Image (cartoon, rainbow, N blue to C red):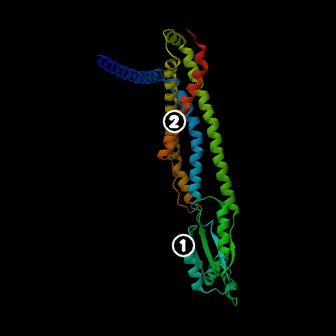
Amino acid sequence: MSKAVKHSNNQQSRITVRSQGSAYIQHHKLMAADSLQRLLATPASSLMTWVVLAIALALPMTLYVALENVKQLSRSWDQTSQISVYLKKGVLPRFAEDMTADLNSWPEVNSAVYISPEQALKEFSASTGLSDVIFGLDTNPLPGVISVVPVLNNQDETALEALQQKLQDQKHVDSVQLDLMWVKRLYQFMELGQRLVWALAALLGLAVLLIIGNTIRLAIEGRKDEIRVVKLVGGTDAFVRRPFLYTGIWFGLGGGLIAWLLLNIGLFWLSGPVEKLISLYGSEFTLQGLGFSDSLLLILDGVVLGWLGAWLAVARHLNRIEP
């Protein structure tokens, strides 16, 4: 008899837990739908809030996309980043060619091209227009040169300095010329841009929290009587808080989606002129937009900031309302 009673009690407890879980999920669905319906019931004010949030979310992401495109463009500046390796006078062409082949196998070297003294003299003559004077010389004063294009993926000038020293230590090398100033300027610009992205993201993230918090505060003020009634019949703080949290989530989600849309429209609008401008400098460049991960991050940022702003506002103002 006791076993039957115990089994019946266990079965009833499982049914109770299952029903409570089902009711909990059902209440979440109802609150999410009700919050969205309330926002759509006032489309003008809701749209204004969404657009303001979208602008705040889109600005740091725009700077981030611009920085990524500058990085992509910098990878195509190979000729600017070349290292000139001047060989010793009298080095035989076969030794220079063997050294060039060896340099091409280095992981930190993108490409290496040997320029013979005769070829260097012809190029110098063509660029200066002093062919009569140059070819009147008894001997060729120019040495053989290996033009080395380094790999710049690590974005670190110390790696170029190490490569320069490594080249200097090679046999048959007289001197190595590398202009690091432009590289240092580029890397400092990249670092400055990254810090600006984080600073702007932090400031505008705070602005999003303030916007959401003020919006939720107004919503709480408008539903004071409803909150008092719910608390009077025994509603918990979590129960009362839930619809406002969903309101913040909907605001954040809408702001993130509109920010993604605005950013992609802007990139599409600018892609043509930017690519034409870069092509005038002899570089092939395609303006890169948001990838899937970046797009998802933008929308999730909006949702998280919306939820956090709503939670902070509810935690501050809800306790003041007593039945």
Residue 94, horizontal then vertical, whole percent: 57, 85
Q: Residue at x 59, y 16 (%)?
A: 319
Q: Earlier in the sequence, mark 2 or mark 1?
A: 1
Q: Secondary structure at mark 2?
A: helix
Residue 306, horizontal then vertical, whole percent: 54, 30
In the rendered structure, find residue 105 and report the number of the disc placed on it.
Answer: 1
Q: Is residue 177 above or below residue 209?
A: below
The residue positioned farthest toward the bottom in the image shown: 138
- Residue 241 visible: yes
Image quadrant in which you'd find residue 132: bottom right
- Closer to the eye: label 2 or 1: 1
Number of disc labels:
2
Mark 2 Cα-neighbour bin, 10 Å: few <14, some 14–19, many ≥20: many
Q: Amino acid at mark 1?
A: Ser
In the rendered structure, find residue 170 and report the number of the disc placed on it.
Answer: none
Q: Amino acid at mark 2?
A: Gly
Judge left or right: residue 54 versus residue 34.
Answer: right
Image quadrant in which you'd find residue 59: top right
- Residue 264 visible: no
Q: Secondary structure at mark 1?
A: loop
Q: Residue at x 49, y 45 (%)?
A: 293
Judge left or right: residue 317 versus residue 136.
Answer: left
Image quadrant in which you'd find residue 219: top right
Q: Quadrant where the C terminus lies?
A: top right
Q: CA distance from mark 2 to mark 1?
A: 47 Å
Q: Is the Cβ of the residue at disc 2 closer than 8 Å to that at disc 1?
A: no
For label 2, the residue is 256
Residue 130, horizontal then vertical, whole percent: 68, 81
Residue 36, horizontal then vertical, whole percent: 45, 24
Q: Is residue 255 above or below residue 87?
A: above
Q: Quadrant where the N terminus lies?
A: top left
